[in-house]
């Protein structure tokens, strides 16, 4: 009877040990799969994290060159993270903070609704990027799409800057300024 009890205890102990080892093996396998998935995600995002240099003309470049907040933001935007997904997350957080600083520091020549609204859209796109890249299950397609949209928005801001400067070069005809002011006052009365 004692031998049967000892055998029974040994059987129970061995079952417990084997089941613990199986759980550890499953955990290691799941961790390994998660690491592989994270590395594939990193490779995919890294390959598509391409911010293009904007097409400034000389005049707009000269004005923007003195806009410190834009330069900090733009230089940060063009630097690609290299190490891991965490680096992309930190980059997105940094870009959001920097684009928020642009609103209150726009040079006078560009401080109009057309530029402010484009910066606001750029801000929104960067916040979307930050949200996507900080999710537990990162949607790589959404991250890649948002990076492409941010490129479009940056180009839109720069294009509008060039247009504003080009329009300032156009000479007004005699009486045109008074006519435009009169039209503006009529609009505000309605």
Image (cartoon, rainbow, N blue to C red):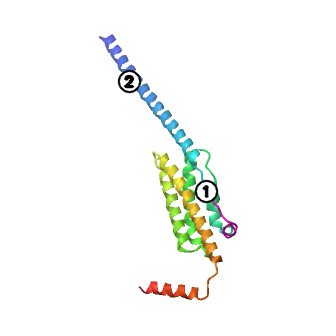
The label shown at residue 16 is 2
Q: Which of pointers 1 and 2 lies earlier in the amino acid sequence?
A: 2
Disc number placed over residue 131 in the picture, else none = none
Q: What x and y, as percent, mark residue 72?
A: 64, 62
Which image quadrant is residue 64 in? bottom right
Residue 106 percent location from the top left of the image: 60, 71
- Within 10 Å of the Cα at label 2, are there few (<14), some (14-19), or many (20+) other Cα atoms? few
Which residue corresponds to mark 1?
77
Q: CA distance from mark 1 to mark 2?
A: 54 Å
Residue toward you, 36 or 15: 36
> Does dot 1 land on a helix, a strand or a loop?
helix
The residue that appears at 62% across and 65% down in the rendered structure is 70
Proximity of marks 1 and 2: CB atoms separated by less than 8 Å: no
- Range drawn in magenta: 54-63
Residue 30 location in percent, x, y? 46, 33
Q: Is residue 133 in view from this perspective?
A: no
User: Residue at image x 58%, y 45%?
Assistant: 47
Q: Nearer the viewer, residue 136 or 138?
A: 138
In this view, the mark in front (1 or 2): 1
| Count of numbered circles on the image | 2
Tell me if residue 97 comes above or below residue 7 in the rendering.
below
Quarter of the image that includes the C terminus: bottom left
Residue that appears at 64% across and 53% down:
79
Residue 120 appears in the rendering: yes
Dot 1, how many residues are within 10 Å of its Cα: few (below 14), some (14-19), or many (20+)?
Answer: many
Q: Position of residue 4 (x, y in %)?
A: 31, 12
Q: Which residue is located at x 46 percent, y 28 percent? A: 25
Answer whether residue 56 is magenta in the image: yes
On screen, residue 68 versus residue 86, left or right, reads: right
The secondary structure that most of the magenta stretch takes on is helix
**Relative horizontal placement of residue 32, taking residue 171 as reference (left or right):** left
Depicted 45 relative to depicted 128: above or below: above
């Amino acid at each position: 009877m004692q031998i049967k009890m000892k055998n029974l205890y040994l059987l129970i102990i061995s079952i417990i040990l084997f089941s613990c080892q199986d759980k550890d093996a499953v955990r290691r396998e799941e961790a390994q799969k998660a690491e592989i998935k994270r590395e594939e995600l990193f490779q995919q995002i890294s390959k598509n994290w391409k911010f293009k240099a904007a097409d400034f003309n000389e005049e707009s470049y000269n004005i923007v060159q003195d806009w410190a907040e834009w330069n900090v933001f733009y230089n940060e935007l063009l630097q690609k993270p290299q190490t891991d997904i965490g680096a992309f997350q930190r980059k997105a957080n940094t870009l959001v903070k920097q684009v928020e600083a642009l609103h209150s520091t726009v040079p006078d020549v560009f401080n109009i609704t057309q530029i402010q609204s484009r910066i606001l859209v750029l801000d929104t796109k960067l916040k979307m990027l930050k949200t996507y890249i900080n999710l537990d299950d990162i949607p790589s397609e959404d991250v890649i799409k948002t990076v492409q949209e941010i490129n479009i928005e940056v180009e839109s801001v720069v294009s509008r800057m060039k247009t504003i400067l080009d329009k300032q070069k156009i000479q007004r005809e005699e009486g045109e300024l008074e006519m435009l002011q009169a039209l503006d006052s009529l609009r505000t009365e309605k």
